Image: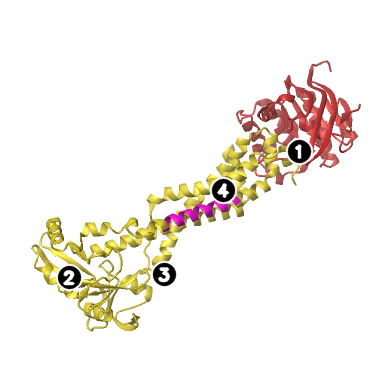
Amino acid sequence: MSEPSIIAIHDLYKTYRLGDVEVPALRGVGLEVARGEFLAVIGPSGSGKSTLFHVLGGLTPPTAGRIVIHGKDLAHMTEAERTKLRREEVGFVFQKYNLLPTLTAHDNISIARYIAGKPLETDAQFADVLDLLGIRHRLHHKPRAMSGGEQQRVAIARAIVNHPSILLADEPTGNLDTKNSTTVLGVLQDLNQRLGQTILMITHNPEAAAYAHRIVQMRDGRVVS
Amino acid sequence: MINKLVIENLRHRPVRTLLSVLAIGVEVTMMLTLVGLSRGMLEDSARRARGVGADIWVRPPGSSAISFSSAPMPEGILRFFEKQPHVVLASGSVIHPIGGVSTVTGLEIDKFNQMSGGFNYRSGGPFEHPDDIIVDERYAAQHKLRAGDKVRLMNRGWRVSGVVEPGKLARLIVPLKTLQDLTGNTGKLTQVYLKLDDPKRTEDVIAALKEKLPDYQIYSIEEFTSLFSVENVPGLRAFIGVIVVLSVVVGFLVVFLSLYTAVLERTREIGILKALGATPGFVLTVLMRETALLALVGTALGILLTYGTRWLIMTLVPASLTQMIVPDWWPIAGAIALAGALLGASYPGWKAARQDAIEALSYE
């Protein structure tokens, strides 16, 4: 854990406005994540975990504070710059897989390359990743023909195909049975160990959190431990 | 890759895609059929005028070249024309409208035969009685008539004496005298046809006639048939314009509704694309390309459907309507359909492009 921080968050605030009501979701979050770290974020519903991920992923701007990813400060980014950040620095894995239902697994992965402006052909290392994920033989199937575990592994492949600085996994095993959960968590651990992929994972499941190097707990919009 | 996404999106919702293509196809067919009908009927009229074999066409003062008004000329004017230099034959007719664009034409059949070379009878023959009628094949087909059959027109019965090949002046021909008396035009003519000894003298003869009959409408056959155009039919261009505008509105509404629901259906997919780093422009491009493809396929379908409408018209009402296929209007109709579709896609596209990624990803 002696690597320099790839994520540095200081006194981060995010307040949503619902009509005339202001809803504070993050209230002064501070967090440092080292390059190559596998971090689990746990906490009750409404504690701000998902909002933290949305801000980290550039899906929404912070209200105040400083948040730096791979040397880029998100606090003053325009929408276009945050879109670029999502293309280049961040990979998402969602609880509901979120694959495009009209495309095959292969094309779901390719479209991430296309959007990032990269050649559609992947390198040999990625072929190994597909082997590691165990989905190489399922690449020409559409999501509806795949199990939840397979879909989630395709989603992981899509998230890392552009070699992002950080992989944000939001309840990646939330919709999976125990066997598939174990497989997916094993894959995330492998990616972290073999490729040095920095991973932040939201989970409610202590067993899932145990796969991480470090666990941080959030409550009421703050990191409490 | 983006084209693959577009095609897969369209394939993924086949009913919606099919309905959109069909609606755009009908829009294109509406335009092409209307233009094809306008041109077809005018061209058919011009072809039948050329079939008369006349070099000069004379209509009474104050008449329009292609109207069906029966503003009459005295029958004695034929003798005047026949005395003019280079005129070898003068024949006249009475034209009486019987509803819609249909007319009955009264002819002196012997003179008309001399001028035109005669009718080509498919069955039967020339008039034998005052209440005989000659019909062309199209009218006979539409009304299931054969030589010898009885037909009721203008509140009286007629015997079909012959069925002739179409293309010579009229579809319904009766003896001149009968029609003159029946329509209160005894001794009068609606139009006169002149045959010259040398067609090259047409312009000189017309100039001479115009000096003597300054108020009459006197045309060479080329000039007369050139008047059968959309521009010369009062209100036709405006009518086509109205149909085109209606077509655009239909295309706009269809694509608007189709894409509006598509954007709602695909809210989560739009969120996924945004999470992957897709720009608003990328999302808009996907929807616009989908729309353009729908318009393209719809246009192709619309063009094919015009062959269907032409077949229907030729089968059901060959005498009343004539539809031409108008390839020069294919790109115009396609462009209009595309413009309407892109206009219809603009708001849903804008809405999709501005979709909040977080809200979209949480959309159920």
Task: Please check whether the numbered discs 4 and 3 fall on a single chain.
Answer: yes
- Say which element carries label 3: helix
- Magenta stretch, residue numbers: B239-256
Could you give the CA–CA distance between mark 1 and mark 3, rounded to whole angstroms? 60 Å
Which chain shows up in yellow?
B
Residue under pointer 2:
B91
Task: Please check whether the numbered discs 2 and 4 fall on a single chain.
Answer: yes
Could you give the CA–CA distance between mark 1 and mark 4, rounded to whole angstroms? 37 Å
* Corner quadrant of residue A134: top right
Could you give the CA–CA distance between mark 2 and mark 1, rounded to whole angstroms? 89 Å
Contact flag, marks 2 and 1 (Cβ < 8 Å): no
Q: Residue at x 41, y 63 (%)?
A: B311
Which chain shows up in red?
A
Q: Look at the magenta stretch and give its main secondary structure.
A: helix
Where residue A152 is drawn, which disc sits there? Answer: 1
Question: Could you tell me which chain the residue with mark 4 belongs to?
Answer: B
**Residue B252 in magenta stretch:** yes
User: At which x and y percent is residue B173?
Assistant: 27, 75
Q: Residue at x 11, y 69 (%)?
A: B80
Q: Dot 3 surroundings within 10 Å: few (below 14), some, or many (20 or more)?
A: some
Q: Is residue A211 above or below residue B312?
A: above
